[in-house]
Amino acid sequence: MGSHERRERERAELRNRIIAAARELFASRGVEAVTMRAVADRVEYTATALYSHFADKNALLHAIVTEDFLLFAKQLLAVEAIPEPVLRLHAAAHAFARFGLEHPNHYRLMFMTPLADIEPGIRRGAYAEDAYAFLQKMVADAKQAGDLLPHLSDPELVCQLYFTTLHGIVSMHVAMGTAETAKASWIEWRPVELLVDLACDGLFAATVTTKAQETLRAHRRAKSVQPRKSPTTKVRR
Amino acid sequence: MGSHERRERERAELRNRIIAAARELFASRGVEAVTMRAVADRVEYTATALYSHFADKNALLHAIVTEDFLLFAKQLLAVEAIPEPVLRLHAAAHAFARFGLEHPNHYRLMFMTPLADIEPGIRRGAYAEDAYAFLQKMVADAKQAGDLLPHLSDPELVCQLYFTTLHGIVSMHVAMGTAETAKASWIEWRPVELLVDLACDGLFAATVTTKAQETLRAHRRAKSVQPRKSPTTKVRR
DNA sequence: GTGCTCAAGTTAACACCGTTATATTTGTGT
DNA sequence: ACACAAATATAACGGTGTTAACTTGAGCAC
């Protein structure tokens, strides 16, 4: 009979509902603060029922993070259409930051939560599934096009500079909390887009030939997209 | 009698032993993984005894982090002796990174652990106690000396660029774990000092006048050509 | 229909956690 | 010697992740 299939379908559907509920709770309240019982309540089951779908709490988190990594990579892949390697690298950097800032809770789970010992279920190094690998490819393309400064013999190092720099901006802003937690933070954080722009300027200045930088500037002009400037009249101190 | 004083001294000493034991455990195993009972065992007391010294687990963590912040600021302050603002800023950036990399566990507690709602017991904004405020001062000095690029009207933004960039490098390396957890990390991380140097190049290229960069380069040359000539007040560590 | 199977889901329980209320020891002042 | 206060211990509470044991109900052979 087809009842086997139906049961399997129902089982998969419940599994997805659990993931969805858990993601929402984990993201808004933090992993530690969310109990298995709370997740179970949300889908109107008992806590123990979750354990027939996920080995333990970590496996549940693991499933969620895997989905998030794939989403991340998918959004990064959107810049692949850009033909110029420098512009593509630049767009990739911005896309990286944008994802983190638009999905702070996903980002926190992905890069700021100790994942216990489990590796996320993506194929690491596959540039279509792994953000770091994608950045790697962007840098490699730029190097092949001769856009990288010649004294930078190690593209991996350049890639890691991009990765850590962007991670610094994003993670700090994610940690400070967008709103509700407020988190005191006596620091008067400037609009994060300004930071990203400035950081990209620095990254390019340190890694890319002047010719390539000129390409970027020309592109900005062509699009009549001015590099963002800080609102000088409004900023205090 | 003087026994009051002795009792107080003994009490303070126990408090310090608790902090020391907790710091060691928190740092090596992570805050969540360490129980109050484990800390108590370490100092050969019962768990409940801790509660007459600290309101709860968070207060204990709070006390530890406060000490760490002061140590951090103290290490940063060592660069104050450098007279040239650009060189001082450069040294401050390196000292920032060095602290995080030499004390990864402290750094994790300070900047990568949600501190519940409690603020660390340092005077935020006081540059002798607060690393961010110290960076602020370094940037302000550089601006006053005319070393900052004129189009950067907002020194706070520059400070935040430095802060987040360095935090990115350090936190990523701290998260990847120095050793035992291994953390798989398929990424072949380059020596972190290379990253810091390259990042500083980028930071300076994006924020500091060519003249100031020349000062830095000249200093590097002087140091490598005639290392013997360093004055007596050379800053170590 | 009557049993049988077996998986999904439940209830009950375990060991452990942070924390508190209560009891007990210990040292000091008179 | 006795009372008092502080320091510490014992016992317990509610809550956690997780496991063991039981219940239920759909599918299926006869």
Image: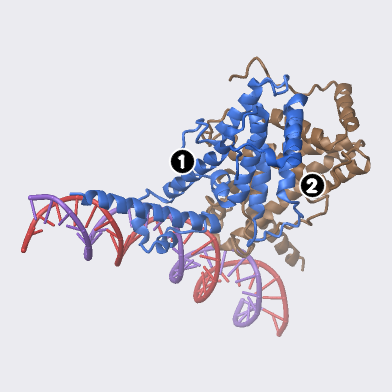
Chain colours: A brown, B blue, C purple, D red
> What secondary structure is found at the residue carrying circle 2?
helix
> What secondary structure is found at the residue carrying circle 1?
loop
Residue positioned 78% across, 24% down in the render:
A227
- For the C terminus of chain B, give its image quadrant: top right
Mark 2–mark 1 CB contact (< 8 Å): no
Residue B72 location (% of width, % of height): 54, 42
Report crowding for label 1: few under 14, some 14 to 19, many 20 or more residues within 10 A (C-alpha): few
Label 1 sits on residue: B118
Residue B170 location (% of width, % of height): 65, 46
Residue positioned 41% across, 64% down in the render:
B41
Q: What's the mark number on residue A127?
A: none
Depth check, front residue: A170 or A102: A170
Residue positioned 78% across, 48% down in the render:
A132
Q: Same chain, marks 2 and 1?
A: no
Q: What's the mark number on residue A157?
A: 2
Residue D14 location (% of width, % of height): 39, 55
